[in-house]
Amino acid sequence: MNEDRSLSAEQEVGRINAFFPILPNLGNHWAAERPWEDATIALNLHLTTLTACLVRELSLGGGTFVLSAANPRTTDASSVDLLRNLGFSVYTGGDMEDRHAQVLDHEPNYVVDTGFELTHSLLERRGNLSAVRAGIEITRNGVTRLRGRGSVPFPVVNINDGRLKDRVENRHGVGESIWQAVSLSTGMHLAGRRVLVVGYGPVGRGLARYASAAGMAVEVCETDPVRQLFAHYDGYPTPTLEEGLQRARLLVTATGRRDAVTLAHLEHARDGLILVNAGHGGDEIDVEGIRRVCKRRDHVADQVARYQLESGAALTVLGDGHPLNIVVNSGSPEPVLLHFAVLGLTLQWLASQPDLSPGEVIVSEEIENRAARFALDALNPARA
Ligand SMILES: NC(=O)c1ccc[n+]([C@@H]2O[C@H](COP(=O)([O-])OP(=O)(O)OC[C@H]3O[C@@H](n4cnc5c(N)ncnc54)[C@H](O)[C@@H]3O)[C@@H](O)[C@H]2O)c1
């Protein structure tokens, strides 16, 4: 019997909460405390079902929540519908500046950001700075931009550099979910395939480990000599990008850097290479360049495009070079939900600290310990 296996965002949220109820448990706690009563909170996030899970529970703590899409390519339409049906203002149209302007018109007191994009708009272009009490940055790229700026006129809590994110979300969450997304997009069985992992930070390390576990042959390209050495002692060959490209069937980037893989690099690629990005943005692989120089582009399937180059080699790009696990909405949600628990507990802490000094604040051990306790309760490891 045929059965419609697609889940609405509402059902998906229910399924996620049924197996790992960390956010509903926190929601009960916030409903009792009402920590951000009367505050306006702006969130610039990937708009997925997990974000819907988060915002629904956060709103039980009072306040007004307004959202902008961090990346249209990672925006899930049914999650946006769900959020709007729940009464939240969600801005997804126009370019990034339009979305930010719409969010900032609400004069937020707290700004929760992915990649320091909304905060940058607030500081550079517009926005009532006097209303802003604090910010939260959730990504490595955002923290790099925050530090590059030198100073900010309000406190910004960096929840990327605590003990939890690197170890759980970056390593295990992305490590597992990218390969699920590749299998979902291509139908390929991954065992026996050779992959080149570009970047060996926590994300690259997780990608390599889960690829190995799936039976893939893994090589690692890393520019930092210390991390290259880690990759070597973890058991992976560490060729240059040009050398590795001659052998790899798949390449996955996790550098957080624009143009880590350029057209010049791709001249060394073997025919049939599949390109995947796991990093924050959509610019680690020069997909624009590939599109510009290719002889022909074929749409193979949803999120799968094949480009025929003049040289005769064909390249397949998944998710148009955007973070594939988020584009495809795949993988275990637990690591992201744990990160969101840290986010919510940080917001609660900020609401109780009116006199913090401006500048970067690293998320405290106390907040992470609380999040870990909520996670352990949700996992109930004795019965796992
Ligand atoms: N897809 C997701 O769900 C998800 C989740 C978490 C983080 N991220 C993103 O993944 C990216 C990596 O995260 P991370 O925590 O591992 O970052 P990281 O900065 O710790 O590691 C990146 C590594 O890439 C290396 N590198 C930089 N340029 C390179 C190049 N041209 N060639 C080879 N190596 C290069 C750096 O030396 C570094 O070791 C970031 O953009 C982060 O925001 C994505």
Image (tube, rainbow, N blue to C red):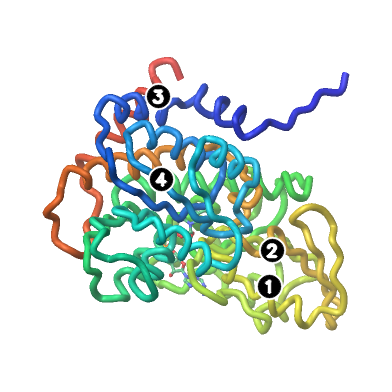
Residue situated in front as seen by the camera: 280 or 271 = 280
Q: Are marks 1 and 2 in contact (CB under 8 Å)?
A: yes
User: CB at mark 1 closer than 8 A to ligand 1?
Assistant: no
Name the residue carrying label 3: 378
Residue 320: mark: 2
Name the residue carrying label 1: 287
Which quadrant would residue 270 be assigned to in this image? bottom right
Q: CA distance from mark 1 to mark 2?
A: 7 Å
Residue situated in front as seen by the camera: 213 or 71 = 71
Name the residue carrying label 4: 65
Q: Give percent across and percent down for residue 233.
A: 44, 58
Q: Nearer the viewer, mark 3 or mark 4?
A: 4
User: CB at mark 4 closer than 8 A to ligand 1?
Assistant: no
Q: Give percent across and percent down for residue 58.
A: 38, 37
Callout 1: helix, strand or loop?
helix
- Identified at 72% across, 81% down, the residue is 267
Q: CA distance from mark 3 to mark 2?
A: 35 Å
The correct choice, above or below, for 103 with respect to 288 in the image is above
Which quadrant would residue 248 be assigned to in this image? bottom right
Q: Nearer the viewer, mark 2 or mark 4?
A: 4
Label 3: few (<14), some or many (≥20) within 10 Å?
A: some
